[in-house]
Image: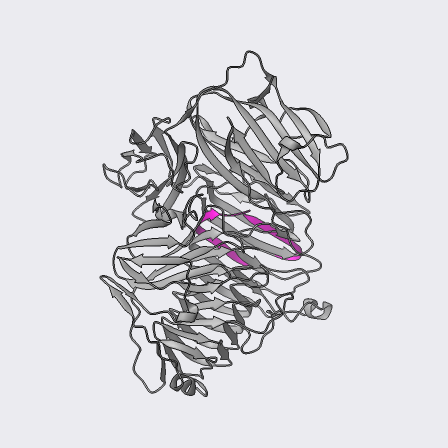
């Protein structure tokens, strides 16, 4: 391997030593790679935090058993708006003491820790990679060991080579797999790629050495195990061109691009026969993408037919992106065939928001402007959705998309923000147990999904034999009050309850009927700022044959009640006022004079020709029964919800859509509070500066499943 052994000989040896704690092993981090914002203890032993890219940081350590993790932020108020630990299926909740949070982890896992809803390109996030100890370096004359320390230069293995990156090895360069076969890259090292790409243009698509963290061209039979990729420039992270027989295991990819574009996680350009297992992807573009070729943006390059992509499997992985799709297959004008692409048994931690010609989704297939090809055997199965945007966007103008199946898709705790579409030459699409919370979609309107331009309507499979569903009694409760949970009976099934409050059920975690007491009113995300906290209760049901189903429900523990207003008479509707102006954030309306006013039945108003304005709706919302209620607010340009004088939800800053798509992306926030039956003062503020449309307000509570607040619930004097 020319150049590599010279590079190893010139290693800069670290002066620090690996820090060991009972049950864990953590390699040292070079000083120039360390973060100063987060300080982390694992089992009371300091573990160095790696400054990866942008505001993304991570820790790497190995463990064979449970660990206690504490994370201290440099900003004392950093966690004031709560703590979001993903994947949600683990049911984890932090405890907090000022700037420090504590987490108990039962064993190896890959986590994302951030503030609720704060996961876009400027977000500060901490990733925890707790792995099983790696195997030692194998013997043999063909083995090159890269020891701990800093190394500058790329890795260029030849056919038959084995490269072992020891824990604590940091290689500043690329892993180039150029026309090689039977190569292994093992260990627990890190490649840091920061290339010469133009930060304001897309040059990351190019196929050449030293242009990606991992670049493969006509490579065959390659195994990569335990590698971490850090990508700091605007380039595709892992590009596989006309390569087959690749196996990735325990891969960690962290890309953070300030421009928030053109930094895919893994791309197939022809080839396939690839298995990716136990991977973590954080990208600033599509996490996974497959096309026949990509040779630039010229007309000639776009219409040039590409090679087939066949037999790609991604499983047991976690996917996060700040923009674009979780999976992208197809692009305008592209001509290629794809057969056999499966994503299964994985977590979608963060889906990209907005649109690039086509709305972003779990799966985006944008076969427009003459794109053609035969695409079949695409399967998405056993996926848990945390923060996400829309389910599917399928478009193909010429033959054809067929055999697309979405089976066991569980959205645990957030509604879809944007609708789905199936357009053009598309047929044989099946939705088999797509669930939002506890509700299974049985028709297009429940996705929601629009089918157009000759596409065949999708099939909805019959109800599965194994169904996870549960009730809680009482529906109205406070901290430390006993609640009984009862699951729908399933003969021979095993029930696993996760109460997402840092505890498990006192009466056993696997019974069909369990009893539990929530310890406080702060909620799963420690956001009980209005005297009520929403806990994400999860139920997993499994049978002896290995089938499984999930159900989720948000339950609110109430410590502080809000009494109903004393209103002698009220009529349907809300009063609104419109203020002219082009604000980028909601203004202080006290000092402003409205240009229009009127009444509306709900959150709509006639702006009468104004295009840049703010609207304020005021009145009352009618609550039918005492209880803890959660309100979900969705808007594009910025909105705020106030009930009984308390801010319940405020969407994030406007986030522009890309590729010429007009307006801003949909933003989301939610909040909970305890309301007595009767009328409660409500105020909704919203901007219209770049986008059309009114804010969307949803609610859930005792006797109210997650749904849009109906017009009949709004009242005014």
Percent across and percent down for residue 396 are 65, 55
Q: Which residue lies furthest to the right in this view?
A: 609
Residue 311 position, x and y percent, is 49, 65
Q: Is residue 572 above or below residue 419?
A: above
- Quarter of the image containing the N terminus? bottom left
Q: Tell me, yes or no, if residue 546 can be seen here.
A: no
Residue 521 showing in the rendered view: yes
Magenta stretch, main secondary structure, is: strand
Q: Residue at x 60, y 41 (%)?
A: 638
Q: Quadrant of residue 5?
A: bottom left
What number of labels is visible?
0
> Which quadrant holds the C terminus?
top right
Q: Which residue is drawn at 43% across and 47% down?
A: 77
Residue 359 magenta-highlighted: no
Above or below: residue 612 compared with residue 255:
above
- Name the residue at 61% across, 67% down: 199
Q: Position of residue 303 (x, y in %)?
A: 69, 67
The reply, left or right, for residue 641 in relation to residue 304 is left
Q: Which sits in the foreground, 150 or 225? A: 150
Find out whether residue 399 is within the magenta segment: yes
In terms of depth relative to the viewer, which is nearer, 264 or 21?
A: 21
Magenta span covers which residues?
Answer: 376-400
Question: Residue 691 location in percent, x, y?
Answer: 68, 43
Q: Nearer the viewer, residue 77 or 137?
A: 77
The residue sitting at 53% across, 33% down in the picture is 698
């Amino acid at each position: 391997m020319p150049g590599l052994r010279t590079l190893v000989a010139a290693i800069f040896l670290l002066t620090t030593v690996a820090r060991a704690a009972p049950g864990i092993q953590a390699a040292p981090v070079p000083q120039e790679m360390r973060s100063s914002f987060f300080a982390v203890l694992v089992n009371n032993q300091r573990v160095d935090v790696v400054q990866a890219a942008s505001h993304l940081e991570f820790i790497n350590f190995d463990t064979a058993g449970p660990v206690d993790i504490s994370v201290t932020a440099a900003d004392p108020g950093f966690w004031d708006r709560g703590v979001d630990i993903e994947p949600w299926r683990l049911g984890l909740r932090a405890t907090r003491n000022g700037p420090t949070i504590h987490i108990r982890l039962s064993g190896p896992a890959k986590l994302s820790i951030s503030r609720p809803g704060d996961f876009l390109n400027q977000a500060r996030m901490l990733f925890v990679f707790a792995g099983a100890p790696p195997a030692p370096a194998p013997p043999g004359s063909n083995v090159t060991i890269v020891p701990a320390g800093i190394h500058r230069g790329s890795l260029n293995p030849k056919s038959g080579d084995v490269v072992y990156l020891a824990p604590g090895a940091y290689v500043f360069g690329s892993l180039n797999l150029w026309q090689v076969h039977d190569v292994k890259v093992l260990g627990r090292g890190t490649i840091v790629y920061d290339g010469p790409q133009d930060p304001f243009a897309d040059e990351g698509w190019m196929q050449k050495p030293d242009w990606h963290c991992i670049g493969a061209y006509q490579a065959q039979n390659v195994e990569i195990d335990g590698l971490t990729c850090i990508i700091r420039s605007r380039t595709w992270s892992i590009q596989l061109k006309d390569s087959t027989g690749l196996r990735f295991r325990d891969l960690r990819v962290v890309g953070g691009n300030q421009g928030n574009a053109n930094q895919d996680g893994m791309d197939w350009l022809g080839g396939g026969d690839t298995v990716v297992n136990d991977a973590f992807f954080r990208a600033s573009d599509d996490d996974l993408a497959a096309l026949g070729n990509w040779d630039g943006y010229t007309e000639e390059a776009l219409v040039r037919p590409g090679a087939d992509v066949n037999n790609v499997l991604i499983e047991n992985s976690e996917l996060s992106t700040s923009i674009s799709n979780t999976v992208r297959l197809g692009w305008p004008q592209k001509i290629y065939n794809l057969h056999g692409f499966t994503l299964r048994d994985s977590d979608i931690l963060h889906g990209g928001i907005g649109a690039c010609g086509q709305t972003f989704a779990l799966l985006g297939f944008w076969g427009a402007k003459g794109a053609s090809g035969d695409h079949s055997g695409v399967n998405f199965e056993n996926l848990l959705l945390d923060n996400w945007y829309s389910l599917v966007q399928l478009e193909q103008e010429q033959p054809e998309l067929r055999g697309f199946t979405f089976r066991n898709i569980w959205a645990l705790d957030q509604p879809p923000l944007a609708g789905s579409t199936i357009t053009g030459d598309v047929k044989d699409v099946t939705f088999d147990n797509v669930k939002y919370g506890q509700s299974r979609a049985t028709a297009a309107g429940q996705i929601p999904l629009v089918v157009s331009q000759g596409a065949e309507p999708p099939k909805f499979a019959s109800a599965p034999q194994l169904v996870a569903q549960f009730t809680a009694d009482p529906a109205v409760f406070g901290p430390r009050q006993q609640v009984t949970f009862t699951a729908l009976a399933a003969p021979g099934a095993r029930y696993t309850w996760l109460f997402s409050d840092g505890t498990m059920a006192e009466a056993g975690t696997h019974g069909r009927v369990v009893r539990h007491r929530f310890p406080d009113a702060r909620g799963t995300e420690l956001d009980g700022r209005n005297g009520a906290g929403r806990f994400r209760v999860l139920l997993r049901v499994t049978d002896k044959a290995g089938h499984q189903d999930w159900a989720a429900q948000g339950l609110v523990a109430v410590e502080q009640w809000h009494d109903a207003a004393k209103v002698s008479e009220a009529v349907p509707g809300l009063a609104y006022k419109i203020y002219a102006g082009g604000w980028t954030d909601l203004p202080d309306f006290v000092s402003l004079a409205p240009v229009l006013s009127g009444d509306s039945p709900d959150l709509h108003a006639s702006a009468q020709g104004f295009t840049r304005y703010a609207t304020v709706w005021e009145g009352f919302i009618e609550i039918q029964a005492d209880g803890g209620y959660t309100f979900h607010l969705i808007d594009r340009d910025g909105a705020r919800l106030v009930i009984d004088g308390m801010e319940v939800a405020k969407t994030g800053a406007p986030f522009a859509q890309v590729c010429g798509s007009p307006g801003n992306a949909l933003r989301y926030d939610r909040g909970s509070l305890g309301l007595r039956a009767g009328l409660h003062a409500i105020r909704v503020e919203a901007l219209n500066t770049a986008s059309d449309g009114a804010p969307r307000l949803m609610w859930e509570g005792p006797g109210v499943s997650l749904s849009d607040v109906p017009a009949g619930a709004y009242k005014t004097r």
